[in-house]
Image (cartoon, rainbow, N blue to C red):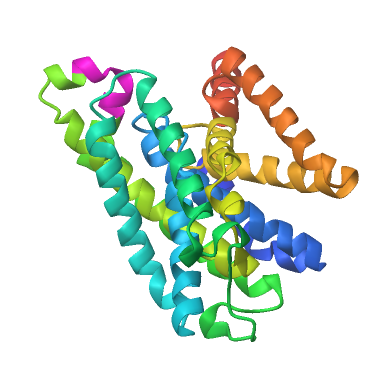
């Protein structure tokens, strides 16, 4: 068995047994938050990492995924889980509507456009009474596993672990197919890819729609786990920023980079919040910003890029 495969198996086993090691509610809750961040970071990575189209408005899709199930529940008292596929389809449709005009923009204008659209969605949801306005929406109050309404974070942990495994499997499949090859060509040089006959515009749209649907899935799980959402908690700018940071720190454009970034960043954030109270929320993002500045300056490939570079250097000197 090769060393990378052995490392992968050990990491997967560590994720499976984590709740049995961290038996406290706080420890298991942190595990759930790590998986949620890894899910959203992996989803952002499809378009932001592989295609290098840096979106700072992915909170739009996260918020759609969070609001649709809870809106359905508040209006009909139906099972919110049933609305998750609809939320993913709606997010993909919104992504198509956003991508058609914004992908005609070049350079950093796409990032600026997504940033502006994110703020517009935040404002629109906040002033819409039918969506709960600034107060937000609440989920099921009774304990029902079929509605993913449970008191213990342990069941959520394993549901999210399965979802993350499936999403990583999807990205791995994309990597080895035409979509992945074309996205990497676009990442290397959009102009060169276009000159070689790659339908750049079409594949950027495809990447954005897949990324949006996966981000909505993460948003739905977040809403059902927390049981309450408001505009700032799911449409806020920091939601988008966290996706970017998680993927960039671990290694944008790599399969396991977002998971590595989430494993490092989320416990740091929770530790800062627990240690410094409300002030810890701001402090954690100061730390995040410093880490990203250092990485973009000295190791743009993230921690996985640094690891691979050190491994190849050690192998070359052996």
Q: Residue 220, relative to residue 304: is it above or below? A: below
**Could one spot residue 5 in this view of the protein?**
no
**Could one spot residue 120 in this view of the protein?**
yes
Is residue 81 shown left or right of residue 297? left
Residue visible at 68% across and 64% down in the picture: 17
Residue 134 placement (x, y as % from top left): 60, 56
Q: Tell me the magenta residue range.
A: 184-192
Between 262 and 175, the residue placed more toward the observer is: 262
Q: Quadrant of the C terminus?
A: top right
Residue visible at 44% across and 83% down in the picture: 76
Report the magenta stretch's main SS: helix
Q: Residue 275, relative to residue 48: is it above or below? A: below
Residue 130 placement (x, y as % from top left): 46, 66
Q: Is residue 230 covered in magenta?
A: no
Q: Is residue 187 covered in magenta?
A: yes
Q: Residue 230, relative to residue 286: is it above or below? A: below
Residue visible at 46% across and 79% down in the picture: 75
Between 216 and 121, the residue placed more toward the observer is: 121
């Amino acid at each position: 068995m090769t060393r990378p495969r052995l490392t992968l198996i050990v990491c997967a086993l560590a994720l499976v047994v984590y709740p049995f090691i961290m038996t406290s509610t706080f420890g298991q809750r942190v595990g759930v938050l790590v998986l949620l961040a890894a899910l959203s970071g992996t989803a952002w990575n499809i378009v932001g990492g592989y295609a290098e189209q840096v979106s700072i408005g992915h909170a739009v899709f996260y918020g759609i995924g969070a609001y649709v199930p809870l809106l359905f529940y508040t209006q009909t008292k139906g099972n919110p889980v049933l609305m998750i596929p609809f939320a993913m389809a709606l997010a993909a449709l919104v992504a198509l509507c956003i991508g058609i005009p914004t992908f005609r923009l070049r350079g950093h204008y796409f990032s600026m456009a997504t940033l502006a659209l994110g703020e517009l969605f935040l404002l629109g949801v906040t002033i819409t009474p039918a969506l709960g306005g600034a107060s937000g929406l609440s989920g099921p109050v009774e304990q029902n596993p079929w509605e993913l309404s449970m008191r213990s974070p342990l069941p959520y942990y394993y549901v999210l672990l399965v979802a993350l495994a499936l999403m990583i499997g999807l990205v791995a499949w994309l990597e080895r197919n035409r979509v992945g090859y074309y996205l990497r060509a676009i990442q290397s040089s959009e102009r060169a890819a276009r000159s070689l006959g790659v339908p750049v515009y079409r594949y950027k749209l495809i990447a954005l729609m897949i990324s949006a649907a996966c981000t909505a899935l993460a948003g739905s799980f977040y809403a059902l786990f927390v049981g309450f959402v408001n505009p700032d908690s799911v449409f806020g700018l920091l939601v988008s920023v966290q996706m970017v940071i998680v993927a960039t720190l671990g290694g944008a454009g790599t399969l396991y980079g977002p998971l590595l970034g989430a494993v490092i960043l989320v416990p740091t954030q929770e530790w800062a919040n627990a240690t410094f109270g409300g002030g810890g929320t701001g402090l954690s993002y100061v730390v995040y910003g410093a880490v990203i500045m250092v990485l973009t300056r000295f190791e743009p490939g993230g921690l996985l890029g640094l690891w691979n570079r050190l491994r190849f250097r050690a192998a070359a000197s052996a």
